[in-house]
Image (cartoon, helix red, strand yellow):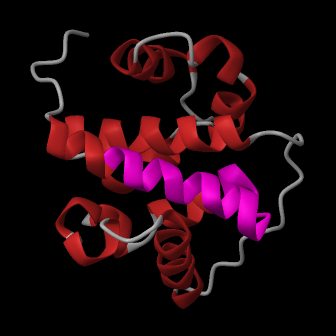
């Protein structure tokens, strides 16, 4: 699929802030990457993240805490990580991928829940070598749940 726009520098700064927060949640809080993302996809703050200037300009640790608080407000428990040690790059990449995708295709929102995040996680080695738009296209074809 040919994407009709690229993200501008401002949007990429939002993407990096979210990605850093996902990495921080993995490193500092020991949270499972996929479980954390699934919880985030259900929150209003994720669905309007690009409008949350007072959130995404914070440090990664602060953003991760704010996002986790929003997940907990929904009564969602995020399990402690059982991911492979050293998965910080995977956490960052997954955060980057999903926020990039969200900003590229604004209608996505919590539609990410229909994708197999565990499959995407385990396919990091091949997916992260692609451009983000190419990885998105591959995920759309290969990682639909059920």
x and y percentages locating residue 1 in the rendered image: 26, 10
Give the side of residue 98 with respect to residue 24, left or right.
left
Give the side of residue 80 with respect to residue 26, left or right.
right
111, above or below 97, in the image:
below
Q: Residue at x 46, y 17 (%)?
A: 135
Name the foreground residue: 27 vs 108: 27
Name the foreground residue: 37 vs 13: 13
Q: Residue at x 49, y 74 (%)?
A: 67
Q: Residue at x 22, y 59 (%)?
A: 50
Name the foreground residue: 114 vs 80: 80
**Name of the residue lying farthest toward the left:** 4
Q: What is the quadrant of the C terminus in the image?
A: top right
- Magenta stretch secondary structure, dominant: helix
Numbered range of the magenta stretch: 15-35
Magenta highlight on residue 27: yes
**Name of the residue lying farthest toward the front:** 59
Give the quarter of the image for residue 91.
top right
Asked if residue 105 shows in the view, the reply is no
78, above or below 86, in the image:
below
Give the side of residue 51 with respect to residue 143, left or right.
left
Q: Residue at x 38, y 71 (%)?
A: 58
Give the side of residue 88 with respect to residue 137, left or right.
right
x and y percentages locating residue 121 in the rendered image: 69, 33
x and y percentages locating residue 16 in the rendered image: 39, 46
């Amino acid at each position: 699929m040919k994407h009709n726009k690229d993200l501008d520098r401002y949007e990429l700064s939002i993407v990096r802030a979210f990605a850093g927060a996902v990495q921080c949640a993995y490193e500092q809080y020991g949270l499972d990457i996929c479980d954390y993302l699934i919880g985030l996809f259900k929150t209003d703050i994720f669905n309007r993240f690009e409008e949350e200037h007072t959130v995404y300009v914070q440090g990664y640790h602060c953003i991760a805490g704010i996002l986790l608080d929003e997940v907990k407000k929904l009564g969602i428990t995020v399990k402690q990580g059982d991911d492979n040690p050293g998965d910080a790059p995977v956490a960052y990449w997954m955060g980057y991928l999903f926020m990039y995708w969200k900003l590229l295709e604004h209608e996505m929102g919590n539609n990410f829940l229909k994708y197999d995040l565990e499959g995407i996680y385990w396919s990091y080695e091949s997916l992260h070598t692609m451009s983000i738009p190419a990885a998105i296209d591959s995920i759309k074809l290969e990682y639909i749940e059920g």
